[in-house]
Image: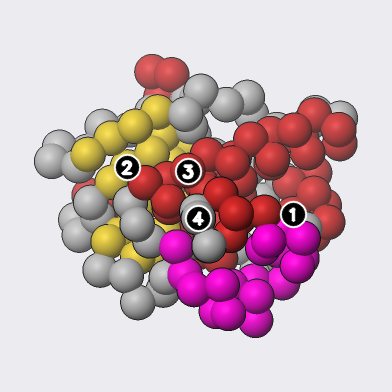
Amino acid sequence: MLKVIFACVHNAGRSQMAAAFFNKLADQTQAKAISAGTEPGLRVHPEVLAVMQEVGIDLTNAKPQKLTQELASDAALLITMGCGDKCPYVPGLRRDDWPLNDPKGLPTEEVRRIRDDIRSRVETLVNSEGLFASLIERSTSASCFPLSEIARIAYQIGF
């Protein structure tokens, strides 16, 4: 199973959104995502909770966690999210960086833009890795994707 880690500094915004979208889109028998941070916050930012709730994803029980060597030991891919010099380096992992603004304290419209950018990037990642869950699986388990969204994704991947 492919394990992907999404990491930012506080693990309270960008990385939480990315892992949630990845776990909704990817075939759960082939891949899973976790999120972590180098300096984890106490909780997920309230503005992130609100905009994710808008797309049917509840992060109220998500807890920021520290990125440790143990956590990363069986991962294949680390995606850092605009944290500059504070981004972790984990030897042996394939790595990519997504330069994204921290949503903390931003107006709701800007947090939505960040959320939508993250969702698009995750869709591209899942597609490029060949990890999309079946449309039936996504339509029943991923309430964050209404039928119109499922149709759009199906069109993008050639169904």
Label 1 sits on residue: 52
Estimate the x, y position of residue 46 in percent, counting from the top left.
Answer: 79, 48
Label 3 sits on residue: 124
| Residue 101 makes an appearance in the image | yes
Label 2 sits on residue: 78
| Front tag of 3 and 4 | 4
> Residue at coordinates 63% horizontally, 35% vertically from top-left?
117
Distance in Å between CA atoms under marks 3 and 4: 14 Å
Q: Please name the amino acid that badge 2 sits on.
A: Leu
Distance in Å between CA atoms under marks 1 and 2: 22 Å
Label 4 sits on residue: 158
Q: Please name the amino acid that badge 1 sits on.
A: Met
| Front tag of 4 and 2 | 4
> On the picture, is 138 further left or further right than 98?
right
Label 1 SS: helix
The magenta-colored residue range is 132-151
Is residue 71 part of the magenta span, yes or no?
A: no
Q: Which badge, 4 or 2, is on the more N-terminal residue? A: 2
